[in-house]
Every structure is written in C-alpha cells, then in structure tokens.
Amino acid sequence: MEHKAGFVNIIGNPNVGKSTLMNSLIGEKLSIITAKAQTTRHRIMGILNKEDYQVVFSDTPGIVNPHYKLQNSMLNAVEEAIKDADMFLLVTEIGETLKSESILQHILESEVPVALILNKIDLVQQEEVEAKIAYWKEKAPKAEIIPVSALHNFNLEKVMQFILDHLPESPAYYSKEELTDRSMRFFVSEIIREKILLHYQKEIPYSVEVVIEAYKEEENLDHISALIYTERESQKAILIGHKGSALKQVGSEARKEIEAFSGKKVFLELHVKVLKNWRNDANMLKRLGYDNK
Ligand code: GDP
Ligand code: MG
C-alpha cells in the first residue's frame, strides 16, 4: 500500500487559533490554548498517525516584532518552520487583513502549497464569511481558501483533504506510536504555565518561566517538582498570594490536568524563585531552553 508522510507547518499571527486547529486535527490537547496572545513560545510538533499516512504538524509561535530577546527567539522558530515544510496551513481569523511585507505575504508567494484557513467563522454571519473568502481569493490566488471553526470542529475534514492531497509519498518519519517530539516534562511545564496565564493579570504571565526540577515516576504516583521563575520580588509575592492561596490554586488545577493527561496520580510541588531580567539575558534564555541565535 502506498504510504504518505510529511511536514505541515501551521503559521499565522498570534491568537488566530493555530494551537486550537492543531489540537482539533490531532484530537489531543498538545498545545496550550488561552485567550492571551503569545501563549505558544516554543515550536511544538504534533503527529497524526494513521495506517497509510503520517502528518507531522508543527505549531509555530505567533508572528511578532522582535522587541524582547525572547521574541527574537520566537521569530527564529518561525523562520525554521518555513524551511523543510511540505505545505503550510496559514491561519487567519475572520476579521484579519493581509499586511504587506509581512511573513504571511512572504509565505503566500513561496512555492510551497498553502491552505489559507479562515478561522472563527462561528463568530460572524454567512455574508461576512463570503466577503472574506472573496478578499483572500484576490490577495492569495495560489492558496486554497478554507473557512473553518477550529473550536467547533467545523469544516476540518476539508483541511484534512487538502493535507492528504499534498502529502508526499514517503515512509513515516517517526514511530507510529509517537504523538509529539516533546517530553512529559515539557507538557507539565506548559500546563503549569497555562494555569498561570489564566490566573494572573498584566505582565505576570509574560514574566514567568516554568522549569521542571524533578520528575520521579513511581508505580502509582509521579512526584513532580517545578520551579517558577519570575523577574522581580513583587511578581513573586503576587504569584504566591496571601498565605500561598494563589499558588495553591494554580498547583491544584495544574495537578488535575497533568493527571488527566498522564493517566496517573501526581504529587505536584511548586516553588517560586526570582531570576532578575531573565527575558533579556541570552545565557539565561539558553539555560531555559530557548535557542536564541
Ligand atoms: P494561537 O495563538 O494562534 O495558537 O491561538 P489559540 O489556538 O491559542 O486560540 C486563541 C483563542 O481563540 C482561544 O481563546 C481559542 O479558544 C479561540 N479560538 C480558536 N479557534 C476558534 C474558533 O474557531 N472560534 C472561536 N470563536 N474561537 C476560537
Ligand atoms: Mg498557540
């Protein structure tokens, strides 16, 4: 039987629904999703395995202007994603328009097959969807335009069809058992980070990084110890909250989700530590796993 396999890069501006789309296509919550922009800092692979094909998705961090060093590293991840792709799913949300000189435009003009995913159509009337399709047909004549709702699983079979139509004949790149290139440690830190994004306001979510210090697997229980780095003492105090109440809430919600994800009971310990200006410190970024070139 003919076997297909290839790399599908999901790209687009922050908050358009890239992670939601990847999760819906794969059927797993691999990539954390929240309403705050720039949730996805690292590139995350998600693998869809079927008997006669393997699709390796890569969820790219949102396209942003380099401002902090951290964002430079995000942009590197985007450029890396442009190389080696068999096709792109370029995600836009319904209200969006094409900016000239943008990375989106750059991709639309490349030779790689592009599906322009018009996401969040559940938010508007049919006429607006049609007007938007016409707009993108003119702006991106080479791309296939697919209106969807990633959140409500609407029209995603069209996206799958586009992928299968353009997937090269190839043996699988990864073991068919694998769902992602990321470790359980990575998912645990992302789940904790997601809870922080949900519970705190303003700059707090963007000033933290989560590092897993210890991950001890026992037969019936995993012991996980995580360090939450912040940039300032004042942020540390907010994170911890009155008598530790805020951190406790984060820990309890994260633990439940880790247990659901791993299918195992978890003992989760959280500590907060100040690491001055980690976001602008190249060495620190390297230690925390951002390959900032
Ligand atoms: P990313 O930054 O592009 O990865 O975007 P996310 O996947 O994290 O989604 C950002 C926000 O948009 C989240 O609040 C999602 O629930 C929401 N969202 C994603 N897809 C849809 C959709 O089809 N319809 C609606 N109404 N919201 C969506
Ligand atoms: Mg995302």
Image (spheres, rainbow, N blue to C red):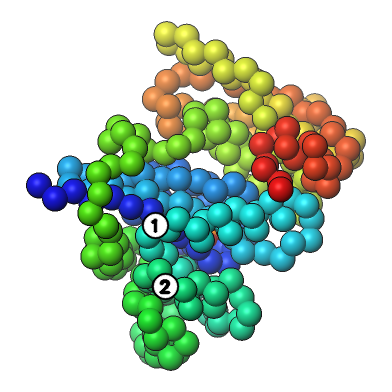
Marks 2 and 1, how far apart at CA = 14 Å
Q: Position of residue 128 (x, y in %)?
A: 43, 87
The answer to whether marks 2 and 1 mark residues whose Cβ atoms lie closer than 8 Å is no
Residue at the spot of label 2: 111
Report the residue marked by disc 1: 8
Quick one: label 2, few (<14), some, or many (20+) residues within 10 Å? few
Please tell me whether residue 135 is drawn above or below residue 80 in the rendered image: below
* Residue type highlighted by circle 1: Val
Question: Earlier along the polypeptide chain: callout 2 or callout 1?
Answer: 1
Which one is nearer the viewer's eye here, 280 or 203? Answer: 280
Q: Is mark 2 within 8 Å of ligand 1?
A: no
- Is 126 left, or right, of 30 in this rendering? left
Image mark count: 2
The one of 258 and 231 positioned closer to us in this rendering:
231
Q: Residue at x 43, y 10 (%)?
A: 220
The location of residue 279, given as percent across then percent down, is 80, 45
